[in-house]
Image (cartoon, rainbow, N blue to C red):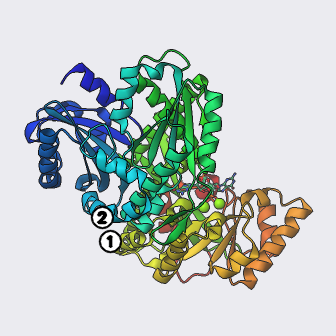
Amino acid sequence: VSDSVVKLVKSFETTREAALVVGENGVLQYVSDKAAQFLACDAAESIGVSLWDIAEDWQECLELALEETLVQQGSRKLELYFEPTESWFELTLTPRGDVGIIVLTHLKDNTDSRGIREQVQSKLKVQVHQQTSSVEVLRLGRQHDSLHDLLTGLYNRFGLIDILEKTHLWQNGTFLLLDVDHFHRLNDSLGPAFGDALLVTLSERFFHTLRPDDLTARLGGDEFAVFLRSANQEEARFVAERLQRSLEQPFFIQGSDVAITVSVGILGNLGGYETPQDMLRDADLCLDYAKRIGNSSISVFDPALREELLARLALEQALKEAVVNNELEVYYQPIFDLRSDKLVGLEALSRWHRQGGAVSPATFIALAEESRLILDIDKWVLERACQQLSHWERQGLVTAPLNINVSASHFAELTMAKHFESTLQSYGVSAKNIHLELTETVLMDEGVQTQQTLQDLQHLGINLHIDDFGTGYASLNYLQRFCAHGLKIDRSFIADLKNPKSFELIRAIIAMAHALNMKVVAEGIETSWQKEQLEDLGCDYGQGYLLSKPLPAKTIETMLQHLPDPKASSVTLPAFLVLN
Ligand code: C2E
Ligand code: MG
Ligand code: MG
């Protein structure tokens, strides 16, 4: 493989994209580290091996597409499922002489069956044609051109880089990278045909908002690039705002109105860039930053940001590997009945020991929340906790229900309830022994999918607890509409118990929760005075360092072994637990 091809391929190393080069019969000629990671193989060892040996199921579709690509020298796009990691990828095949470059865009991990995009496209063509004329004309005219995106008719990444290199324009202009906020949710809930129609309409809006000499490209998935000639970063910000405003009018697609927003990363040539690829890579970092904030944010690149962004990405990468390699651990913090001291629950809390030290959950959970990694962590914790519970049950130990923290973003996932159901089933864990802790944001999310998930979970018989209560903005109205079984008063209120205002607030929360038939748990009890006060206030359960810190499974097991007869009405904790 020539250096120029490798260089081009390397420019695809973004958070969601990776590339490889294949020759005849799918023989791999170059595999980037990222691509190796996506395909769970070793980059160096894969050279000379056929792609079909790594992705058996892809052979049938891909072999034909590759052949066509090479013969017709045109691009092809496919959406394929990769069994070993249960992931969906969008594959864009582009010819470069007698080899094909395949760009893999990571779509999502789950086992939904989705059609191959090409099938969808034939249906879509008709719909799109009725809606958009100019884009469609562009699209048909350029279909076999490897420099344009099949769906929207805009430049693809190759096309953009190609024209920037040929004209040297990139040396004094600014990139805007745009990404649709929560695109995957729309795509999941309304289907890929809808998603495609949305992207086409979106590109048409951009087309009308921009000037004729601005270059627009679709880089893959829901990511677009706009290159503004001879504009600086400040001027580019105005354009970004104008593009965002152009989306304020809802989109009318397949009979319904949808509102979307985009987040934008801006990067001008601040000097020191040798190729447009290098610039695009930093612009992508910047977009990544904007996307984490989400909701129409704009982030302008600043060289000082680069180090910080790279450090975060590295930590995120390490976390991702820790999840895959089972390096996280689950600790359990007991929850007790304040009156009888009986164990009533165990909260599963994840722990990450990295290079000898513990990374605080406040750091890594927040980091994971910004990417979709939190979904993997939550799934992993659920699985590990169910495994643990069934192990304890098999040993004949008396246990308590497990409380599992579930991130708000999880509830908007189409397959969330199903996934929980099948995990419980596979470990033979009864739904009543799993309590999910969710935050007030979930209750306030009016999204159809979130509401559906909450209903499905309740149908399964899983108890729902509202975590960190008092820190969000849930109104009584939400609480009443939603039947939670329990409510956990945030530990900041407990810490402030000596303050009469907090005291009264807690009294009111308890009265309200009891009126709605909810149990109340006080979090973060650190002193016996707090425990007594809470007991007097009628708080049902408590959790905190005074009673027990979160502990590794082995220690909890010892505790369970020391629990007296299940029928006994109270438990005296072994002293080591309190001291731990
Ligand atoms: P949380 O769900 O409110 O969990 C309780 C937190 O309070 C835990 O912090 C626990 O260690 C801490 N804590 C318990 N008793 C006391 C006390 O007496 N004093 C003080 N100062 N702290 C106490 P941790 O383990 O650091 O977790 C922080 C947050 O991270 C959790 O808050 C939870 O929201 C989130 N989290 C942890 N593991 C997971 C997970 O697997 N998935 C998700 N989605 N979130 C998680
Ligand atoms: Mg919690
Ligand atoms: Mg909490």
Q: Look at the image and tell me whether residue 438 can be seen.
A: yes
When the figure is inspected, residue 93 is found, relative to residue 269, above or below; the finding is below
Residue farthest along the left direction in this orientation: 25
- Badge 1 element: helix
Residue 511 x/y as whole percent? 80, 79
- Is residue 530 left or right of 309 when viewed as pictured? right
Q: Amino acid at mark 2?
A: Arg
User: Few, some or many C-alpha atoms within 10 Å of disc 2 (few <14, some 14-19, many ≥20)?
Assistant: some
Give the quarter of the image for residue 33.
Answer: top left
Residue 534 x/y as whole percent? 78, 69
Q: Tell me what residue is drawn at x 44 percent, y 67 percent.
A: 189
Q: Which mark is residue 109?
A: none
Q: Nearer the viewer, residue 259 or 74?
A: 74
- Is residue 442 left or right of 96 when viewed as pictured? right
- Is residue 571 left or right of 375 when viewed as pictured? right
The residue that label 1 is drawn on is 426
Q: Amino acid at mark 1?
A: Ser
Quadrant containing ligand 2 reads bottom right
**Mark pair 2, 1: CA separation:** 24 Å
Q: Tell me what residue is drawn at x 46 percent, y 64 percent.
A: 413
Q: Earlier in the sequence, mark 2 or mark 1?
A: 2
Q: Looking at the rendering, in which quadrant would you find the N terminus? A: top left
Residue 70 x/y as whole percent? 14, 39
Residue 378 x/y as whole percent? 47, 58
When the figure is inspected, residue 395 is found, relative to residue 548, above or below; the finding is below
Q: Tell me what residue is drawn at x 33 percent, y 33 percent.
A: 158
Q: Nearer the viewer, residue 55 or 567?
A: 55
Q: Tell me what residue is drawn at x 69 percent, y 75 percent.
A: 478
Q: Which mark is residue 114?
A: 2
- Is residue 19 left or right of 194 when viewed as pictured? left
Q: Look at the image and tell me whether residue 403 can be seen.
A: no
When the figure is inspected, residue 307 is found, relative to residue 551, above or below; the finding is above
